[in-house]
Amino acid sequence: KNEVEQSPQNLTAQEGEFITINCSYSVGISALHWLQQHPGGGIVSLFMLSSGKKKHGRLIATINIQEKHSSLHITASHPRDSAVYICAVRNYGGSQGNLIFGKGTKLSVKP
Amino acid sequence: NAGVTQTPKFQVLKTGQSMTLQCAQDMNHEYMSWYRQDPGMGLRLIHYSVGAGITDQGEVPNGYNVSRSTTEDFPLRLLSAAPSQTSVYFCASSYTFTGSNYGYTFGSGTRLTVV
């Protein structure tokens, strides 16, 4: 079983829809990261969370430490949001500090 | 501009050739790391460094070497390229290794094909 699981793997939405991407993890963490990778490959950090909720523009990220679960929400989705969204956790033990990545959720927003 | 610079962006190698992927950051970040990204898999850690002169292996280190002689640079060397090393490689850095309050900055990636 992967230590970081994302769902869904693929998501197609119509422009304007509210989108939720989920991330569950099985290890102790010091922080959780949400990353965005556009076609063409560059990876950009969207959020880093250790508790609660963060908001940036139309993006909202939440984390529930007790349930080991995080969600990334996109309100009023737009075709430019089309990308792969990657959840990664910063491991609390073992190779402390290194990220463990989910496989990503590929989002396609149609106009 | 501050950030992580990776070169080259694209590379084709023949089996058995060696090469070095360059990674440089100008943010005085303590922690640097190399990942490979393969279809259907999450990014996997190859090697990492928590400071100049200190490196350690990640999940998939075989066939790769690293060194960290300065804070800024963290090159990844392929010793004898194999088709299994065809992948997209990312370098990333963070201000500190153990702190939970610092994000990661990623390079733009190197697409490597070994034929």
Image (cartoon, coloured by chain):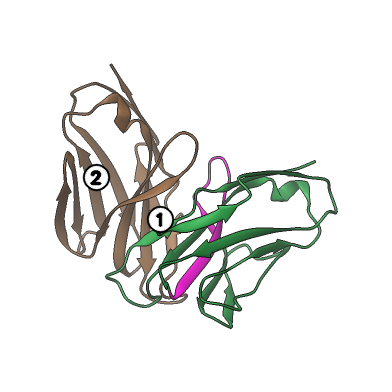
Chain colours: A brown, B green
User: What amino acid type should be assigned to the residue bearing mark 1?
Assistant: Asn
Q: Quadrant of residue A107?
A: top left
| Residue nearest the observer in this picture, A73 or B66 | B66
Residue A19 screen position, x and y as percent: 22, 33
User: What amino acid type should be assigned to the residue bearing mark 2?
Assistant: Leu
Q: Which mark is residue A72?
A: 2
| Residue nearest the observer in this picture, B108 or B89 | B108
For label 1, the SS is loop
Residue B95 screen position, x and y as percent: 37, 72
| Residue nearest the observer in this picture, A30 or A4 | A30
**What range of the chain is rendered magenta?**
B30-45
Residue A12 screen position, x and y as percent: 33, 24
Query: On the image, numbered disc 1 is attached to which residue?
Result: B1
In the picture shown, does residue A78 fall above or below B42? above
Q: Is residue A106 left or right of residue B54?
A: left
In the picture shown, does residue B55 fall above or below A16? below
Residue A3 visible in the current orientation: no
Task: Name the chain letter of the residue that bears numbered label 2.
Answer: A
Q: Quadrant of residue A18?
A: top left
Q: Residue at x 44, y 68 (%)?
A: A98
In the picture shown, does residue A88 fall above or below B66? above
Q: Residue at x 83, y 54 (%)?
A: B17
